[in-house]
Amino acid sequence: MFKRLIQPHALLYQQLRPRANRALHCNGIHTQSGKWQSKRNGVTVATTFTGIGLLGTGMLLYLDNDQLYYYAQTFRRSGTAVVTGAKIALDYQWTLLRASDVDKESAKSACHKRSAERVLHILQTLGGIYIKWGQHLSSMVFVLPEEWTSTLAVLQDRCECASSPEEIRHLVRVDLGQDLDSLFSYFDYEPIGVASLAQVHKAQLASTGEWVAVKIQHPKLDEFCRIDINTVSWIFDTIQSIFPNFGFYWVAEDMRESLPQELDFTVEAANAHKVSEQFAGDRTALVIPEVLWAKRRIICMEYIHGVRIDDLNYMKKHKIDPSTVSTELISIFSRMMFIHGFVHCDPHPGNVMIRASNDNPSGHNFDIVLLDHGVYRTLPDELRVNYAHLWTALIEGDEEGIQRYCELVGGSDHRLFASMLTGREWHTIRSANLSSARTTTEVDRVANKPTMHFLRRIADILSSLPRVMLLLLKTGDLLRNVDELLRNASKPEQYRTYAIMGQFCAKAVWVETKQRISEKAATAGVSWQLVKHFAVAWWKYHRLEYSLWAYNVHSTLRQKLSINFL
């Protein structure tokens, strides 16, 4: 296993670290070899040990110090992760075998807690992409047991130690072929922000004097990122083979797909350019920082001053209504999901800023600045439209439609899947009451639902979903958390999120239906059946659109009147 993990990366590391003179070491092997063989010749056992010693000594002498360090660190990191994975797997197996029916749930809960604490310790020790992976796991509130998500939640605030000025200058010289001082007339080595994969600095371009934000990947990631990805994948492969019902192998697959994109800043630059073009004709509050240039490990962007979207004190100071911010944020992401089909999949509060503005084309007194464009997913048109149909059925409480479109997007167990998408209990969905605020009781019941019984059902759903749907689930959870925070800060307020989403879903379905009818008319001609189909689709679209529009208008008036009377 160790050989399989390190072999593809040995050549890469040799390029990163220069090799010492190999011939001198080889001479040393020859000299020592003669001494040992002359002293103990003829003694079989001693000869065997001598051979082993010679092999080890030869390897030590053949490899220079940098290579030895690399292999030692590789063995340590891989070994630590593998041993921890084995301990967790055995702990779960032993717990399930020993626990009686009476105390099975409490035993499982204790095992969840022990396992999560083991993983937390290892992730914090190894750092790098392991921290990123832990942050991803901690956000899967509806998928993983509460013991896991609450234990790993501390990683959301964990930042790597900032790279030193010497490391930054060296990386710039290697990647750009220029000295940092020739590129920037000013460079603040104290980072604006430090994350698990990179850090951001404020700087001034020497050529134009423009202030910019420079995002620099942690230099040490290049040494072990690929082998860390392979190690985690191997652990999940092993667990899946030992426990076929494990069901969470998709976590490793998602990491293998997402992390290489996040580690290549040219991908981030391309994504930022594409989303800017898609929103160019829309009157929204969205602002995408302009990318000036990008390399794999360095990206230079327009500098924009703002604060996190959950900074309620800033909003109060600048007379920005948090509820309006939430409405605009949901509108932006609804356009991405249901109209454009190109979705930013990591909208946590650290990646979404807000700043006061007086000239926003949307008419609002704020801008929503979207950062970190490393992880996007493109929805195929068929999946995008079926996803819009599914949300329309969820909003209307149409169980037949929910079941049908759940299957079409790759899901199963439609009632549980509906709860995973909305964060609501089934009776709330079935009664078409998504616009009601979630009560504390409902939040607690949903949060505590992942018992082993539900975990197996959830695992079955997730293993059958297309990879893109998994990231949409995560995106929905992150947006829902931000949305509830902002709306709760703007009481009195009715919960309008799903009414806003519904308008974009209805538009996506209507546009697709018109296109399909037009294509049929062009090939087979106009028929009474086609006209009837068009009329029914037109009526469904406008009925839903107008009802949602009326709901939004009523909610806005109710809020304004209530505020006036306060």
Image (cartoon, grey):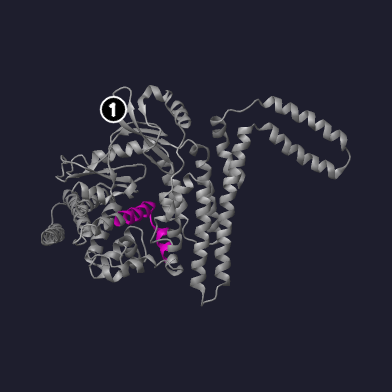
Q: Quadrant of residue 501?
A: bottom left
Task: Give the vertical position of 112 relative to 476 (above or below).
Answer: below
Q: Residue at x 57, y 63 (%)?
A: 91
Task: Give the vertical position of 462 relative to 157 (above or below).
Answer: below
Task: Give the vertical position of 470 relative to 303 (above or below).
Answer: below
Would you say residue 475 sits in the magenta stretch?
A: yes
Examine the rendering and report whether any part of residue 279 can be seen.
yes
Q: Residue furthest bottom?
A: 102
Task: Look at the image and tell me in which quarter the C terminus lies.
Answer: bottom left
Q: Residue at x 36, y 61 (%)?
A: 411
Residue that numbered label 1 is attached to: 210
Would you say residue 394 sits in the magenta stretch?
A: no
- Location of residue 95 in the rendering, given as x and y in whole percent from the top left corner: 56, 68
* Relative depth, front residue between 74 and 314: 314
- Location of residue 431 in the rendering, given as x and y in whole percent from the top left corner: 23, 70
Name the amino acid, label 1. Answer: Glu
Q: Quadrant of residue 540?
A: bottom left
Q: Residue at x 24, y 50 (%)?
A: 329
Local packing at callout 1 (Cα closer than 10 Å; few below 14, some 14-19, many 20+) is few
- Is 476 situated left or right of 148 in this image? left
**Which span of residues is magenta-colored?**
457-480
- Location of residue 267 in the rendering, given as x and y in whole percent from the top left corner: 37, 38
Examine the rendering and report whether any part of residue 145 can be seen.
no
